[in-house]
Image (spheres, rainbow, N blue to C red):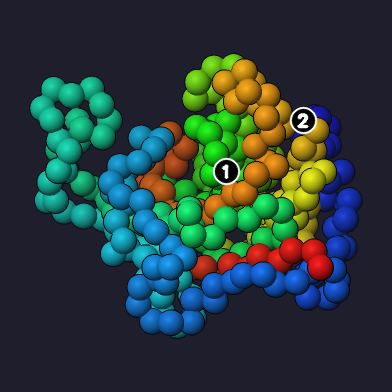
Amino acid sequence: MDMQRFKFLALSLFLAGSLSAQESGEWKLVWSDEFNQEGRLDSTVWSYENGFVRNEEAQWYQPQNAFCTGGSLVIEGRKETGRPNPLYQEGSSDWRRKRKEVGYTSSCVITAGKKEFLYGRFEIRARIPVAGGSWPAIWTLGREQEWPSNGEIDIMEYYRIDGVPHILANAAWGTDRRYVAKWDSQAVPFSHFTDKDPQWAEKFHVWRMDWDEEAIRLYLDDELLNEIPLSETINGSLGKGTNPFKQPHYILLNLALGGINGGTIDDTAFPMRYEIDYVRVYQKQ
């Protein structure tokens, strides 16, 4: 058994039977969005990313692709036809500017500057798209310093690795080189979940992060996927040796398409719908 597989199995056994936030009695709900309204998100909580943002992804982010309906937030990936890229510059080598057209649109919604939290239990119930090219995520970023010295926590990512679907649970922090991160990542083959439930992708699931002064623990349906000790998450020289996971973080929800990790996009799968039932944050009483 390789060490990566051994680590995952050991983590799965540890605390696998932990109680939910409501059952444990240790936690108090400090904020939630249940997405029970119809239409646009609450602007006092959420903002939107715009344009081509990161990772050479195929989608143009815009607010129109995020909307509340039927008690859920829907982030919808759409295929576009004949839409000019407003950033286009002939001869440019910049991935944002060399595309003549916007081929796809989606949304990334964030709580930066509006809802930020230091420690707690984060619960997100969602149903994710799993078609080719889909790259849904639930993640956080620290509010201070440049990436990755601000710290990144990926409560959930889904994408293909060498063509094989995986669910990932990660954290990243800074090194001595600009834009080069140190990662603690667990990539679990999607088959780990679908072998137990062939209809897994048709259902909602609960992703959870328990984050305190000692560690970050990332769960899926109460199964521990990764545990990251904060004693190890120390920034390099660019981050001045600070710990980015001992500062407030904000939440991001997005559906990326293609790019450096998303892989080949299945154009028959549109519109792709990433549905989030709720986001809840608890802190210890």
Disc 1 residue type (three-letter): Gly
Q: Is residue 46 above or below residue 39?
A: above
Q: Position of residue 214 (x, y in %)?
A: 82, 43
Proximity of marks 2 and 1: CB atoms separated by less than 8 Å:
no
Of badges 2 and 1, nearer the viewer stands 1
Q: Is residue 70 left or right of residue 234?
A: left
Residue at (30, 42) in percent of width and height: 52
**Front residue (pair 52, 223):** 52
For residue 142, which numbered disc appears in the image?
A: 1
**Badge 1 density bin: few <14, some 14–19, many ≥20, Cα 10 Å:** many
Classify residue 236 by image quadrant. Answer: top right
Q: Quadrant of residue 63?
A: bottom left
The secondary structure type at the circle numbered 2 is helix
Q: CA distance from mark 2 to mark 1?
A: 17 Å
Which residue corresponds to the image point at 39% horizontal and 68% vertical from the top-left?
Answer: 43
- Pick the front one: 269 or 209: 209
* Relative horizontal placement of residue 181, taking residue 268 as reference (left or right): right
Image coordinates for residue 58, horizontal then vertical, percent:
32, 43
In the drawing, does residue 100 fall left or right of residue 186? left
Q: What's the residue at 71%, 66% (across, down)?
A: 282
Mark 1 secondary-structure assignment: strand
In x, y percent, where is residue 124?
61, 64
